[in-house]
Image (cartoon, rainbow, N blue to C red):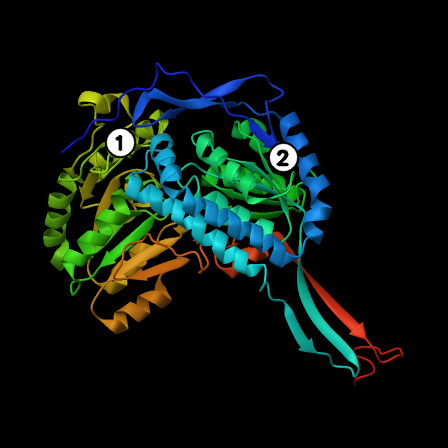
Amino acid sequence: MTQTAPPPSAATTELPAFRHFIAGAWCESTSGQTFESRNPADRRDIVGRFQQGTAADVAMAIRAAETAGPMWRRTPAPKRGEILYAFGALMAQHKERLARAMAREMGKVLSEARGDVQEGIDIAFLMAGEGRRMQGQTVPSELPDKWAMSIRQPIGVAGIITPWNFPMAIPCWKMMPALVTGNTVVFKPSSDTPHCATLLVELMAEAGFPAGVVNLVTGSGGEVGDAIVDSPDIGVISFTGSSTTGRSIATKAGAKLKRLSLELGGKNGVVVLADADLDLATDGILWSAFGTTGQRCTACSRVIVEHDVVEPLLKRLETRAANLRLGPGLDESTDVGPLINAGAVDKVASYVDIGRSEGELVLGGGRARDGDLGHGNFFEPTIFAGVGAMDRIGQEEIFGPVLSVIPVADYGAAMLALNQTRYGLSSSIYTRDVNTAFRAMRDFETGIVYVNAGTTGAETHLPFGGWKETGNGHREAGNVALDTYTEWKSIYVDFSGRLQRAQIDNQ
């Protein structure tokens, strides 16, 4: 395994301190306490100190959002869109700075970090356009001299709770549709990536969002996250994270009849049939499995392969994966960065131990500790062969660089294996047969299906989300993202000058 060293430690430099952003001002937490964010490629490198938020801080943020709400709601949607566009333009202007900050705090390699920022830019521009579209319906009335139409209206204050793995794209996926539709926002980022969130909010303030429209509170899920979920003044919540946490949020939000959008786990599979282009399949699998160190909800963790091509495909995967370079994301030559924290390393290691009893370890399987890599959260790209479709490593989300190869007899068995999981986010098939490709589009029980491509790479103008336990039916991205943050209102205008009774006078 070729490895590169992380950058020198910054532990001896003065640590910057960052604050909440509430009602248009940067402020300290009522707790008086802070926490550190560290570089996962070198735990000696402290990115900064951040506010340890409290329920009182959340209450202040909600009050600020409520105060700003009527003004923001009355701002014409095209004008709201113009501010979104200004924010997207600022992200584009600062793209390299944002990407480098992300690579340092989250560990994502620079090329992927730039892509993460670009997703934020794309969704800002897309939703800016919705300020002038945001279609409702205008339909004929069943009565004469009567007008019928529907419009979208904002729900109120949106609670935005985001993960660390896409620390700029996912907050933008959630906040842009919330804001363009006239909601105000209380934003709680992951405690692993508070600096990325702070940089985003700095640009949002610069773009011209009025005071109180966007509020940032950093801190733990148990304190800040629970306060957002429990507040009766938060009308809609959008959460991306673990299925366990999602279930807990759903229980609490459901008791209050809150609007809730959940984007949860995945166990995504690539099907490779005997007629596939194996070189192309290898490219897609490696990128999907080991890009972002496997820390994507759309990452490929299962390769379901027809028996005839298992060996040639496995040989290609092993050869290519063995040459991937481990190292810090800020090194342009790095292929695979660190896992986000020590707990993630322990989790991946525990699944590798399980995999040793379920399949054949072909490559990797260990923590990367050589040299300066020992100061980071590195794990070798790992491949298991001969895994059963119902084995634990073939069923449970690992969220790391571990790939299971599952042999099957034919397309029917492959389709069954792919669908036999409680998740349903992304899937892929490699085949030259157009008829089989269309069967897969119909048969695969996932919210996203790729043909002759890997399981990652969703574009912002189509709906993003999954079936089954991957979520609760809502979608992010695309114009359907507006559904999470709006209520429909049907309007009837009767200009007949007399009482007209629908369903009675038109019999």
Q: Is residue 263 visible?
A: no
Q: Which mark is residue 257?
A: none
Amino acid type of disc 1?
Answer: Pro
Residue 102 location, x and y as percent? 38, 35
Q: Residue furthest top?
A: 12
- Please rate how many residues cluster around mark 2, counting C-alpha atoms within 10 Å: few if below 14, some from 14 to 19, many from 20: some
What is the secondary structure assignment of the residue under circle 2? loop
Amino acid type of disc 2?
Answer: Gly
Question: Which comes before the other along the chain, label 2 or label 1?
Answer: 2
51 versus 278 height, above or below? above
What is the secondary structure assignment of the residue under circle 1? loop
In the picture of the structure, the residue carrying the numbered disc 2 is 24
In the picture of the structure, the residue carrying the numbered disc 1 is 328
Front residue of 380/76: it is: 76
Q: Quadrant of the C terminus?
A: bottom right
Residue 280 location, x and y as percent? 18, 58
Mark 2 and mark 1: span between their CA atoms? 35 Å
Q: Is residue 172 left or right of residue 266?
A: right
Residue 318 location, x and y as percent? 13, 44
Q: Quadrant of the N terminus?
A: top left
- Please rate how many residues cluster around mark 1, counting C-alpha atoms within 10 Å: few if below 14, some from 14 to 19, many from 20: many
